[in-house]
């Protein structure tokens, strides 16, 4: 015991010495331990307020957001034990090879030095920041606070901010030699308004918008640097007059508009002829002339427009048939008012076939080998109709908690899509402003054998439109989708489960779904150039309403039948809403916090007493409540003691996930994570007691898991290995819900590819 205590004391002493972080500082250097103050004062102090103060203050904080070693959750003012700096000190070596160097370089972190923070430069950046916001005359200062040995220091900053300049008058005028342009310029809608505060980014944006406006109105020769902004700050009262115009003395050709005289279309090396044929021909095939002409908005005998050039290149790229489209212009026969356009593109491989044998996984927690075949055929009917067919055979087995109670899964699946440009949208809200709208026909099928339960066949066919309403917002509308699934055979175990829960048979057998859905996606998740990224995706689906009306007409409106059918098939009637929200908060260049909230609910009515099995919700799997296998928890506090994971689904789902991700080296990253959630029933089910949702105890009835993980970047994919445990299980009685109370081995590994969210 004494030896153990001495060993512990030695380890504590080593950690204490290492925690100082100053053992291997270069001579004359100081360890930076954080920024602990940013004081911003107004001058004069009263009589005015800083407009958009919260945004300006946030920008100022990001400017001095320098993280010390051991910064907690990315905050420069909150520092805990610098574990990676400790590793650096433990394994410090001046050698460039060997084990100590490898440990120091991969798991350690060099000391953050005060000289690298450069408080004087940061102060000047703060001053520039507020002057860019119009607060001309801002002054700044900083203080360095040392410890007694001057080996560590933290920094505080201060700013004295005067009132910002505002725009008194905003005009858009060109030189008198270009008076003919003034009527065009007068149509420009300015982003700058009198009374707004000066903002350098707004000025840059105004210049870019004015240049784009002139380019879109035929002024081919005007370049970005020809646009100038002049400001007069001598008008007094913290105001300025601003004029946006052009450089003086531009050549006459720059001040006139240009018309496209001719347009030449070159596919690969073949120049297309305007001979009235219905098709354009090239080595790999042909394409309808009318279609291609409608998508190339650069046309002869029309005024030059930069917007048309961008739209043409985008349309050709998104068709999926051509690659590397380019549009170039040349002056026509020395006439500066006429230009010739040349549209070049290269055809992609029309047919491609590939086979693959790979280890695969599903987010539900199943893993195993799969054999796949992919066929891609471009321009099938000479109208940019692109066909993609995937045929896969698979064998999956589960891993994780309760894996011995989950059956293996084998099967074959077919997924096919035929997509084409949507030239004439059926609805006015579908437009081509930000992308080329597409129409899609989907045909999918799967034969799945759940060895212990059943063999299921499913089939679906649908028609959908896809488009974008902004660079970050995309939409998908399917006016019709038909899905049919049925059980081909069952096992005695499944038959036993059905006797205990007859509604299970109803949700799995002879399911016919005719419905429509709409989905919306907003993707602003990338955090390369910002701190916070967000993502949202929602979907609403409705099924069975039209068939219900038809069946009512067929039976004369009789209410005698409990369940109606059409063409000899019972159909499902329900409405379902699902959504997913994510946000990533970049702490620094090596770490981020990732949060996700997933939810959904479905209501069956009319011809259905419950949702079809393939539309019911579940939790668990590699991307859900780790390390639990899919369909092994819930609904609610219900627990399935037998091998019946097909029974653990619900009408409502709520789930939250949180991960702290940190980079160890260029190939290896780590994560600390926690998941919480469950599924519930909206109606009481005697065969699944305690499964109905209790709205006032939704948190008490949710599962909580936590764990650690490693992510290995192998270039083409990210291999993810997690290990976690179930911290809280609501199906236990009070006093045994937490892991340390029930003492059951509810932990295990999770293997996946890519990040969970």
Image (tube, rainbow, N blue to C red):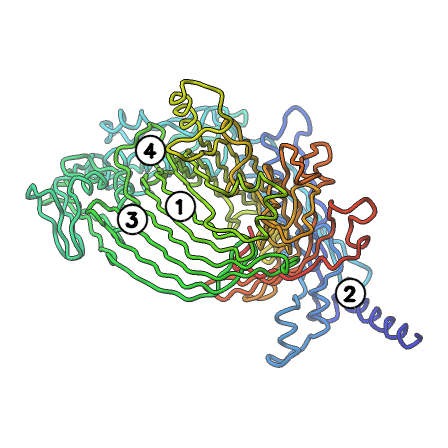
How crowded pointer 2 is (Cα within 10 Å; few <14, some 14-19, many 20+) is rated as some
| Quadrant of the snapshot with the N terminus | bottom right
Sooner in the amino-acid sequence: mark 1 or mark 3: 3
Mark 3 in CB contact with mark 4 (< 8 angstroms): no
Indicate left or right for 259 with 617 as reference: left
Q: Is residue 192 above or below residue 130?
A: above
Q: CA distance from mark 3 to mark 4?
A: 17 Å
Observer-side mark, 1 or 3, equals 1
- Report the Cα–Cα distance between label 1 and label 3: 32 Å
Q: Is 127 in front, or is 21?
A: 21
- The answer for how far apart the CA atoms under marks 1 and 4 are is 31 Å
Asked if labels 4 and 2 touch by Cβ distance under 8 angstroms, the answer is no
Instruction: Inspect this view and state whether residue 670 appears.
Output: no
- Residue 710 percent across, percent down from the top left: 61, 63
Q: Which residue has dot 3 on it?
A: 317
552 and 279: which is toward the camera = 552
Q: How crowded is the residue under tag 4: few (<14 C-alpha within 10 Å), some, or many (20+)?
A: some
Tell which circle, 3 or 4, labels the residue nearer the N-terminal end: 3
Residue assigned mark 2: 20
Q: Is residue 220 in view?
A: yes
Q: Give the quadrant of residue 140.
A: top right
Q: CA distance from mark 2 to mark 4?
A: 61 Å
Residue 49 lies, with reference to residue 85, above or below; the image says above
Residue lying farthest left? 275
Question: Mark 2 or 4, which is nearer the eye?
Answer: 4
**Which structural element holds mark 4?**
loop
Q: Residues within 10 Å of mark 3 (few under 14, many from 20)?
A: some
């Amino acid at each position: 015991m004494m030896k153990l205590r001495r060993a512990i004391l030695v380890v504590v002493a080593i950690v204490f010495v290492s925690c100082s972080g100053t053992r291997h500082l270069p001579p004359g250097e100081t360890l930076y331990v954080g920024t602990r103050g940013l004081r911003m004062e107004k001058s004069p102090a009263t009589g005015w307020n800083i407009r958009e103060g919260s945004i300006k203050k946030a920008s100022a904080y990001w400017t001095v957001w320098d993280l010390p070693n051991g910064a907690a959750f990315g905050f420069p003012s909150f520092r805990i034990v610098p574990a990676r700096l400790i590793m650096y000190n433990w394994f410090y070596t001046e050698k460039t090879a060997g084990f100590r160097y490898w440990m120091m370089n991969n798991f350690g972190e060099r000391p953050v030095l005060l000289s690298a923070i450069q408080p004087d430069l940061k102060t000047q950046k703060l001053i520039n920041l507020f002057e860019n916001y119009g607060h001309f005359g801002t002054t700044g200062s900083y203080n360095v606070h040392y410890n007694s040995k001057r080996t560590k220091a933290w920094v505080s900053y201060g700013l004295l901010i005067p009132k910002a300049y505002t725009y008194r008058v905003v005009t858009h005028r060109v030189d008198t030699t270009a008076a003919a342009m003034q009527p065009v310029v007068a149509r420009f809608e300015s982003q700058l308004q009198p009374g707004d505060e000066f903002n350098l980014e707004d000025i840059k944006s105004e210049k870019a918008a004015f240049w784009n406006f002139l380019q879109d109105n035929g002024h081919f020769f005007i370049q970005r640097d020809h646009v100038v902004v002049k400001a007069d700050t001598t008008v007094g009262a913290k105001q300025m007059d601003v004029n946006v115009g052009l450089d003086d003395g531009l050549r006459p050709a720059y001040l006139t508009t240009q018309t496209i005289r001719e347009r030449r279309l070159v596919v690969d090396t073949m120049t297309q002829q305007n001979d009235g044929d219905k098709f354009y021909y090239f080595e790999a095939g042909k394409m309808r002339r009318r279609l291609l002409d409608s998508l190339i908005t650069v046309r002869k005998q029309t005024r030059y427009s930069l917007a048309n050039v961008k739209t043409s290149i985008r349309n050709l790229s998104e068709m999926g048939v051509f690659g590397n489209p380019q549009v170039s212009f040349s002056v026509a026969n020395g006439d500066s008012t006429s230009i010739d356009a040349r549209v070049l593109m290269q055809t992609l491989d029309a047919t491609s076939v590939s086979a693959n044998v790979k280890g695969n996984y599903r987010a539900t927690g199943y893993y195993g080998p799969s054999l796949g075949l992919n066929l891609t055929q471009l321009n099938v009917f000479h109208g940019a109709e692109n066909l993609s067919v995937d045929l896969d055979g698979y064998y999956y087995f589960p891993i994780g908690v309760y894996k011995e109670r989950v059956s293996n899964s084998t099967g074959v699946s077919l997924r096919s899509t035929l997509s084409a440009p949507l030239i004439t949208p059926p609805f006015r809200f579908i437009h081509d402003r930000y992308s080329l709208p597409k129409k899609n026909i989907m045909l999918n099928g799967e034969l799945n054998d759940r060895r212990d339960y059943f063999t299921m066949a499913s089939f679906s066919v649908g028609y959908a439109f896809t488009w974008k309403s902004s660079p970050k917002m995309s939409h998908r509308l399917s006016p019709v989708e038909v899905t049919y699934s049925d059980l081909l055979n069952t096992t005695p175990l499944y038959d036993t489960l059905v006797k205990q829960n007859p509604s299970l048979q109803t949700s799995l057998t002879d399911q016919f779904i005719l419905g429509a859905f709409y989905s919306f996606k907003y993707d602003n998740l990338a955090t390369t150039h910002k701190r916070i990224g967000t993502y949202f995706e929602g979907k609403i689906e409705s099924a069975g309403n039209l068939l219900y009306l038809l069946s009512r007409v067929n039976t004369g409106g009789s209410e005698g039948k409990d369940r109606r059918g059409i063409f000899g098939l019972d159909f499902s009637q329900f409405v379902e809403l699902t959504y997913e929200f994510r946000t990533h908060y970049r702490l620094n260049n090596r770490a981020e916090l990732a949060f996700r909230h997933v939810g959904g609910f479905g209501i069956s009515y009319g011809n259905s007493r419950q949702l079809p099995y393939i539309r019911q919700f579940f939790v668990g799997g590699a991307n859900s409540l780790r390390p639990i296998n899919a369909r092994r928890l819930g609904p609610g506090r219900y627990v399935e003691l037998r091998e019946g994971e097909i029974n653990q689904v619900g009408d409502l789902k709520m789930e939250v996930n949180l991960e702290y991700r940190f980079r160890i080296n260029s190939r290896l990253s780590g994560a600390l994570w926690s998941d919480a959630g469950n599924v519930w029933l909206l109606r009481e089910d005697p065969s699944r007691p305690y499964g109905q949702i209790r709205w006032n105890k939704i948190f008490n009835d949710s599962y909580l898991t936590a764990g650690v993980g490693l992510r290995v970047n192998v270039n083409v994919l990210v291999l993810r290995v997690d290990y976690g445990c179930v911290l809280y299980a609501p199906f236990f009685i009070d006093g045994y819900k937490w892991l340390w109370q029930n003492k059951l081995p509810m932990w295990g590994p999770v293997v996946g590819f890519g990040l969970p969210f």
